[in-house]
Amino acid sequence: MDQLPFVTFPASVASPVFGAHPNLTLSNIRTLQSSLTSNDYRLFIPSPAIDLASRPLSPLPNTQTIIMPGKHVHFNEENIFYSPSATPSPSLTESSLPSSDGPYTPPQLKTPLGPVAIHPLLAFHPYVFPINYDVSRTPNTAYANIQASPVPLDSYRRSEPATNPPIHVLTLKSELLPWRCEIRASTLPYITVEDVLGQLYGFLRTPATRDEYKAAPNQFVRDKIAESYGRRCSRASSAEEYAQEQRKGLKRVDFLMGTTTFMGLSSTKLGPDVWVLNLQ
């Protein structure tokens, strides 16, 4: 049975009325109790119905922790609504967008009705990965696997169309993830190799929520996700960076449970714009 989640707070909590309250004890809680307002109570007592929009601002990150035997998983509730896409929502029309000072939206191509081939540097092979890339790391760490192809992964190749014929939107799915990653053309009318690598990385860096974590199939999977989170944080080069990564909380990449070697994209029967993300 899952244990109930607990909310962890810093040792020193700031109140808009009383300032900092380090090391609260039973004796001084009674002293403060009579003069605390409802807003102050909300700084100390977590409520499932708390209104995020009206919550008092705090200089410290608002994190929540699920405590399991030997494992601690943090959730950055400030970023629940974070979107990795910098392009306008598909529900918006061009007439509803600002006429200036907005992100550049390249002209869109029609999705082809016939077969679509993926770029050789992104194509799946069951035994040899097309590029050397760990999807938990930044895209600039990717480089071509010379055993698979003599084509280098330079800036010229990164700007090439990711598909033939070129398309403007691509959806990636993985059996390891409960989400689908939508890749959209960013600087050119079509999706490039760089779009795929960069937007996949941004998608996997999206914070995961507590509900998404608890929706994992079973406790064994949740333990593996928590272990992946711990390993990712431990890659930090300093204690400060380690603490910062911990505060950012669980991310979608942790749901891959260490299966992060890019093995390429393979086609599906769901259409020319839906591809399987193969990892090892």
Image: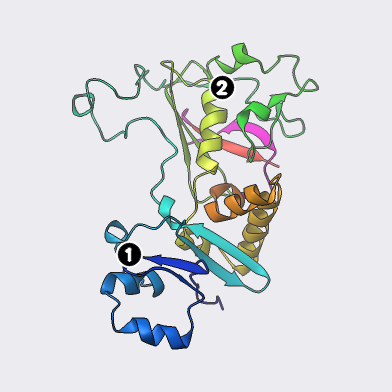
Type of amino acid under label 2:
Val
The image shows a total of numbered marks equal to 2
Point out the frontmost of discs 2 and 1: 1
Quick check: 109 above or below 25? above
* Numbered badge on residue 238: none
Quick check: 146 above or below 236? above
Quick check: 119 above or below 85? above
Q: Secondary structure at mark 1?
A: loop
Type of amino acid under label 1:
Pro
Q: Which residue extends farthest right?
A: 147
Q: Residue at x 52, y 16 (%)?
A: 161
Q: Taking 109 as reference, is 194 left or right?
A: right
Residue 177 shows in the view? yes
Q: Residue at x 28, y 56 (%)?
A: 53
Q: Is residue 198 magenta?
A: no
Q: Position of residue 139 (x, y in %)?
A: 61, 29
Which quadrant of the view contains residue 135? Answer: top right
Pointer 2 or 1: first along the chain: 1
Q: Which residue is mark 2?
A: 193
Q: Position of residue 4 (x, y in %)?
A: 50, 76
Q: Secondary structure at mark 2?
A: helix
- From the viewer's side, name the closer residue of 207 and 10: 10
Query: Where does the magenta region start and end?
Result: 255-273
For mark 1, does the 10 Å Cα neighbourhood hold few (<14), some (14 to 19), or many (20 or more) residues?
Answer: few
Q: Which residue is mark 1?
A: 16
